[in-house]
Image: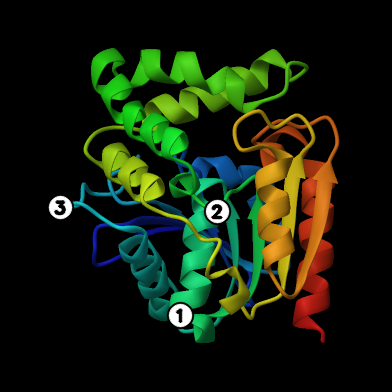
Amino acid sequence: MTAYDPAGLYVEEAGVDGPLVLCLHGIGSSSAAFAPQFAALAGSYRMLAWDAPGYAKSADPTGPLTMDDYADLAADVIRARGGDTHVLGVSWGGVIALRLATRHPGLVESLMIVSSTPGSGTDPDKATAMRARARELARLGPEAFAAARGPRLLSDGAPADLVARVTATMAAAVRLPGYGHAAEAMAATDLRGELQQVTAPTLVLCGDQDRITGPDASQVLAGGLHRTAYVIVKEAGHLANQEQPEHVNAWLASHLHIVTHR
């Protein structure tokens, strides 16, 4: 089932009438990135995945969006479905998920953060590089931009069909101004000072071959959170949930079982 929320957000939905799981994709992706999680978890949970504002099938935003704005829009998606939610965020989506947990703690039952970071605002060089991505997209266009960036999101040993799928997903998802707003929000964000405010139990995962954010950034998140478990996923790059779905899904299912039966 698919739906458009009032803000023009496209939300993919599937699964049983059970606990909600909201999936927030990375900065170069879309709801399509969570197909392996939908397949594994929809038998027990009500799965939701958005296309962020200005991405894929969602409408373009009317103006710039801050990380607070993304978090508030995610909260609106949750409220529209009438229940507290377990939030799965990959990379940029993980940053949104953590900000959501601090701004709207009553809506977040637990967090699952994959290959994420405290934000690009932790370092001036990282912030500059993040802002430069929007100019690169404007110069190259979505297809060439995706061809240049997509393969780096996976390990060197990733199968060719997965590389092609990730690249195609990015090419179909990214456009301006949405990508530019997301990059600016990332460049302006440093979560390190607010991690201790997160009260939701959190599972942090990272691929051992992640060359985008890397295990060090995930360790910062895990170390700053009070109620957390940290897992390294072997033979996986940045998109661990797509490259090693069986292993990641097993950890997600275990986490969800624990937090929904406590």
Q: Which mark is residue 82?
A: none
Q: Nearer the viewer, mark 1 or mark 2?
A: 2
**Left/right of residue 136 with respect to residue 209 in the rendered view:** left
Q: Which mark is residue 118?
A: 2
Residue depicted at x 31% and y 57% = 9
What residue is pinned by disc 1? 104
How far apart, in angstroms, are the residues tagged by discs 3 and 2?
24 Å
Q: Earlier in the sequence, mark 3 or mark 2?
A: 3
Q: Where the C terminus falls, by quadrant?
A: bottom right
What residue is pinned by disc 3? 63
Mark 1 is surrounded, within 10 Å at the Cα level, by few (under 14), some (14 to 19) or many (20 or more) other residues, namely some
Residue depicted at x 35% and y 33% = 174
Q: Is residue 169 above or below residue 36?
A: above
Residue 7 at what x, y percent from top left? 24, 63
Q: Earlier in the sequence, mark 1 or mark 3?
A: 3
Mark 3 is surrounded, within 10 Å at the Cα level, by few (under 14), some (14 to 19) or many (20 or more) other residues, namely few
How far apart, in angstroms, are the residues tagged by discs 1 and 3?
23 Å
Q: As shown in the figure, which amino acid type bears the numbered disc 2?
A: Pro
Q: As shown in the figure, which amino acid type bears the numbered disc 3?
A: Gly
Element carrying mark 2: loop
Please say whether residue 154 is visible from this viewpoint. Answer: yes
Q: As shown in the figure, which amino acid type bears the numbered disc 1?
A: His
Residue depicted at x 64% and y 77% = 19
**Left/right of residue 170 with respect to residue 4 in the rendered view:** right
Mark 2 is surrounded, within 10 Å at the Cα level, by few (under 14), some (14 to 19) or many (20 or more) other residues, namely many
Corner quadrant of residue 112: bottom right
Residue 71 at what x, y percent from top left? 40, 66
**Left/right of residue 18 with respect to residue 100 in the rendered view:** right
The count of marks equals 3
Q: Is residue 127 above or below residue 171?
A: below
Element carrying mark 1: loop
